[in-house]
Amino acid sequence: MDFDLCESNAVCMGIAPEVFEVREDDFLYILDENPPESMRPKLEEAVRSCPRAAISLQD
């Protein structure tokens, strides 16, 4: 996650709320830094959908 690029638009939260959360302070929080492999499709969608390209996956 590149927090310098992130603009807290909550697109990722809409796709994977189990992992991403934008709170009332308008900051994005990572709820699970090591999500299960079963979430990979959602996480890949979040990466593709981020308008600022602030998210990446690391194996």
Image (cartoon, grey):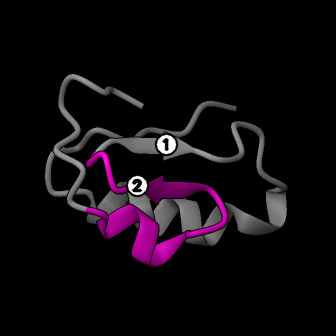
Label 1 environment density (alpha carbons within 10 Å; few <14, some 14–19, many ≥20): some
Label at residue 15: none
- Using residue 41 as the reference point, say whether residue 22 is left or right of it: left
- Read off the residue under disc 2: 23
Q: Which of marks 2 and 1 is nearer the N terminus?
A: 2
- Residue 34, position in %: x, y? 77, 39
Range shown magenta: 10-26
Q: Do the residues labelled 2 and 1 touch (CB within 8 Å)?
A: yes
Q: Which residue is drawn at 30% across and 46% down?
A: 25
- Residue 13 at x, y percent in the picture: 44, 66
Residue at the image position 67 percent from the left and 61 percent from the top: 40
Look at the image and tell me in which quarter the N terminus lies: top left
Identify which residue is drawn at 34% across, 56% down: 24
Residue 51 screen position, x and y as percent: 15, 57
Based on the displayed image, in which of its 4 quarters is residue 18 positioned? bottom right
Disc 2 marks which amino acid?
A: Arg
Say above or below: 9 vs 6. Answer: below
Give the quarter of the image for residue 54: top left
Decide if residue 54 is on the left or right side of residue 20.
Answer: left
Q: Name the residue under label 1.
A: 29
Instruction: Farthest residue to the bottom: give it.
Output: 14
Instruction: Please tell me whether residue 8 belongs to the stretch shown in magenta.
Output: no
Task: Report how far apart the C-alphas of labels 2 and 1 lie in the structure.
Answer: 8 Å
Q: Is residue 23 above or below residue 16?
A: above
The amino acid type found where label 1 is placed reads: Tyr
- Residue at image location 62% in from the left, 56% down from the top: 19
In the displayed structure, 51 sits above or below 25; it is: below
Q: Nearer the viewer, residue 48 or 15?
A: 15
- The quadrant in which the C terminus is found is top right
Q: Nearer the viewer, residue 15 or 30?
A: 30
